[in-house]
Image: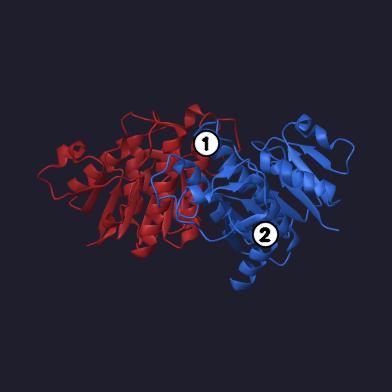
Chain colours: A blue, B red
Amino acid sequence: MSKTLVIGASGQIGQLITKTLVESKEVARALVRDKSKLDEFKGSELEIVEADLEEDFSHAFDGIDNVIFVAGSGGSTGADKTLLIDLWAAKKAVDYAQKTNIKQFIMLSSIGADDPDAMESDIKPYLVAKHMADQYLMASGVPYTIVRPGPLTNDEGEGKITTRRPTTIKEMKIPRADVAKSILYILSREDLNGKIFELFNGSYDIDTILSIEFDLS
Amino acid sequence: MSKTLVIGASGQIGQLITKTLVESKEVARALVRDKSKLDEFKGSELEIVEADLEEDFSHAFDGIDNVIFVAGSGGSTGADKTLLIDLWAAKKAVDYAQKTNIKQFIMLSSIGADDPDAMESDIKPYLVAKHMADQYLMASGVPYTIVRPGPLTNDEGEGKITTRRPTTIKEMKIPRADVAKSILYILSREDLNGKIFELFNGSYDIDTILSIEFDLS
């Protein structure tokens, strides 16, 4: 049975993913800086590894088959942390994945990371960091899927999305729960490699639209 | 006669390089955000192009053979500008160089950019940006030389350097004038490609030590 490492397991999307993995008895390891943030999983089969993403965290990759990178420096920190976490920790994760022959690396990116110059945006420095991290993963030779959701909400997930970019920012939103579900669907598809999906609130079942996208591309 | 583009020509090292190019009648174009910063070159043969590195500056590459990238966001700005200039503008310059078949791209980098994790440093976010920019250039296929000086000083240049890393930070210093001279020597060597030099104050003539390094590596 393959083993999945969740990097950034105490983040909002990270927790949703971890919870589903635990409930569905998948073999998983959660990487967090502070164990206490995952107290709700005490007594479960989940393996928890404490590590600081600003340090060496290569030990977290021992025996791992799949990597889900959902770590982020968060909106309340400065651009120095964007460089150290969103870019550098992601780059290091790709290096570790390369060394340990990871079968699948799923990267949580962001809409706009494909082309940070495309629009005037306050978050352009963040999009630059995500672009370069994505680009590094794509060039690494590690089998990857990159997920680029629109602006995240805490709305209840309805399991309905689209991968076609809507015309207005308002329509681009997507609940974190549906991003988590999409990532878990991708995880289940070990044959996926080299795909980049944008994700928005929509009217298609997650499994349906993502499998169609996969077949089409 | 080949034509050289200096990106960041109004910076301290940029001005030193530009001045020498003008004095030695090289064909050069200086890219600056604000023309008035190069008033001292009025009436010379220097071609000056105004452009904002945060915007599209591809027009500056028309008819160019060699690129010297010595732009930097400077010490007084935040990490957001480090992402936008030191990383993103450098990445864009590499893209433009690729499209216009540049023969030689000389990148001013920094000691520590090879391995930002090597030591605890306040400038680690900056070193991450420089590392990723260097890595992008190295992977681009554009013929390159990367220069990684130690801490820069405004001491008078004596034209004496070393490429061997000294053991103390204090010994690692190097005058900006000697970095400029080293870059101009590299510019004169159109056969150089794929070399990375660290530069420090030392006891060797710039031409001698750099040509030895080139032959050895």
A180 and A187: which one is in front?
Answer: A180
Q: Is residue A93 left or right of residue B65?
A: right
Quarter of the image with the C terminus of chain A is bottom right
Picture coordinates of residue A139, whole percent (x, y): 57, 60
Quarter of the image with the N terminus of chain A is bottom right
Q: Is residue B154 left or right of residue B163?
A: left
Picture coordinates of residue A159, whole percent (x, y): 68, 54
Q: Mark 2, mark 1: which one is toward the viewer? A: 2
The answer to whether residue B201 is visible is no
The chain carrying label 1 is B
B155 and A107: which one is in front?
Answer: A107
Q: Residue furthest toward the bottom?
A: A216
Q: Amino acid at mark 1?
A: Pro
Going 51% across and 39% down the picture, which residue do you hit? B127
Report the number of numbered marks.
Answer: 2
Mark 1, residue position: B125
The chain carrying label 2 is A
Q: Amino acid at mark 2?
A: Ile
Mark 2, residue position: A206
Picture coordinates of residue B171, whole percent (x, y): 48, 30
